[in-house]
Amino acid sequence: MLSQFANGTEAASRVFTYEVQGLRQTEETDNQEYAFRRSGSVFINVPYARMNQEMQRILRLGGKIVSIKPYTGATASDEE
């Protein structure tokens, strides 16, 4: 089991879902190919290896991470 974590195969396959509130259009997001608006909640799937980078990006864009859960493949409407 430890060897799976050491070589990254287990970590590479783990994905988490961030529930983010308060994202808004900024100069940084204007450079995206798509526009997004300030809304209630946005769900973002993030690989384990990029969790820290994605947290920093969300905070830089003015968002607030409400929850982090392991990705199960279900959509938000399936969970409610």
Image (cartoon, helix red, strand yellow):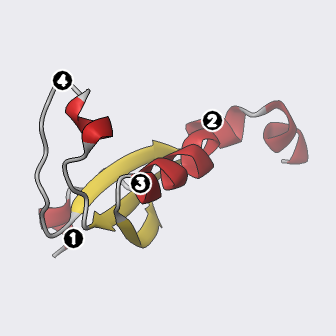
Q: Secondary structure at mark 4?
A: loop
Q: Amino acid at mark 4?
A: Glu
Cα–Cα span, label 3 and label 2: 21 Å
Instruction: Count residues near mark 1 (Cα–Cα under 10 Å), then give few for <14, some for 14-19, many for 20+.
Output: few
Few, some or many residues within 10 Å of mark 4 (<14, 14–19, 20+): few
**Which residue is rendered at x = 15% and y = 76% of the image?**
80
In the rendered image of this protein, does residue 69 appear above or below residue 48?
below
Q: Which mark is residue 79?
A: 1
Q: State how far apart marks 4 and 1 are (Cα).
A: 30 Å
- Of tags 4 and 1, the one toward the viewer is 4
Q: Residues within 10 Å of mark 3 (few under 14, many from 20)?
A: some
Between disc 3 and disc 2, the foreground one is 3
Residue 12: mark in rendering:
2
Q: Which residue carries the number 3 mark?
A: 58
The reply, left or right, for residue 50 in relation to residue 77 is right
Q: Position of residue 29 (x, y in %)?
A: 26, 38
Which amino acid does the dot numbered 3 rest on? Answer: Ile
Q: Which residue is mark 4?
A: 33
Q: Amino acid at mark 1?
A: Glu
Q: Residue furthest top?
A: 33
Q: Is residue 64 above or below residue 31?
A: below
User: Horizontally, is 76 left or right of 8 in the view?
Assistant: left
Image quadrant assignment for residue 30: top left
Dot 1 or dot 2: first in sequence order is 2
Q: Residue at x 88, y 47 (%)?
A: 2
